[in-house]
């Protein structure tokens, strides 16, 4: 598996910090995802071998936490908060806007792998919902118009790339 030298070094540093190797499972998954962008089947096998556990033990953790990804995202990642405060303020409508603008479903890659949008849980700005995280930028009080503006900026990038 092709991990960067820094990732391998981090993994080798972290494992001895735990009394039992298997307890380093979460940090290893984080490190691998940070490096590869997702956690592939091959990566899960590799982590399991590294920690002396079964691949299914890795799979259980990867599939339990929504943060972990089993396939690569598009270049831009949009996360729409669906926790109560944002849901009451219309976050499901916001997701519908992205579905319509990008012509794909949540969790799929759209516009030739340029974007992936999905629901996420509370982004800690509940008083200003609906809240949408676009890459590392938090957008608050997102209404339909703002969601279309976000989508159209990404679509413009797609247009300029495919010209
Ligand atoms: S409920 Fe959406 S940010 Fe907390």
Image (cartoon, rainbow, N blue to C red):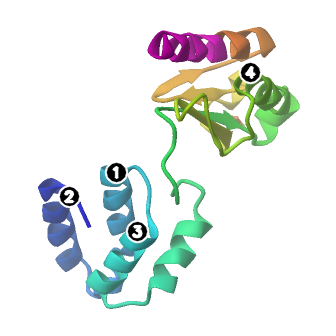
Q: How much space separates mark 2 and mark 1, taking CA atoms?
A: 9 Å
Element at badge 4? helix
Image mark for residue 26: 3
- Which of disc 4 and disc 2 is earlier in sequence? 2
Compared with residue 19, is residue 131 higher up or lower down, i.e. above or below? above
Spatial CA distance of label 3 from label 1 is: 12 Å
Residue at the spot 60% in from the left edge and 16% down from the top edge: 155
Q: Which residues are magenta?
A: 150-163
29 lies above or below 151: below
Across and down, in percent, residue 50 comes to 27, 82
Residue highlighted by disc 1: 34
Q: Secondary structure at mark 1?
A: helix
Disc 4 target residue: 101
Q: Residue furthest front?
A: 163
Local SS, label 2: helix
Nearer to us: label 3 or label 1:
1
Q: Is residue 92 left or right of residue 38?
A: right
- Viewer-proximal residue, 86 or 42? 42
Image location of residue 76, percent across then percent down: 50, 30
Question: For the residue with label 3, is its CB less than 8 Å from the closest atom of ligand 1?
Answer: no
Rendered location of residue 7, percent (x, y):
20, 58
Res 126 → quadrant: top right
Q: Are marks 2 and 4 in contact (CB under 8 Å)?
A: no
Residue 72 magenta-drawn? no
Disc 2: which residue:
7
Of the 4 image quadrants, the one containing the N terminus is bottom left
Seen at 13% across and 63% down, the residue is 9
Upstream in sequence: badge 4 or badge 3 = 3
């Amino acid at each position: 598996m092709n991990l960067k030298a820094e990732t391998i070094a981090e993994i080798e540093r972290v494992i001895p910090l735990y009394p039992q190797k298997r307890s380093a499972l979460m940090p290893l998954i984080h490190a691998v995802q940070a490096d590869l962008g997702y956690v592939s089947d091959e990566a899960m096998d590799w982590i399991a071998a590294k920690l002396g556990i079964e691949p299914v033990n890795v799979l259980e953790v990867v599939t339990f936490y929504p943060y972990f990804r089993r396939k690569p995202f598009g270049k831009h990642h949009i996360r729409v908060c669906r926790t109560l405060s944002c849901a009451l303020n219309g976050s499901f409508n916001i997701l519908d806007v992205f579905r319509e603008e990008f012509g794909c479903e949540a969790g799929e890659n759209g516009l030739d792998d340029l974007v992936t949008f999905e629901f996420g849980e509370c982004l800690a700005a509940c008083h200003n919902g609906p809240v949408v995280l676009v890459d590392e930028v938090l957008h608050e009080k997102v209404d339909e118009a703002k969601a279309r503006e976000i989508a159209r900026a990404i679509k413009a990038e797609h247009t300029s790339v495919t010209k």
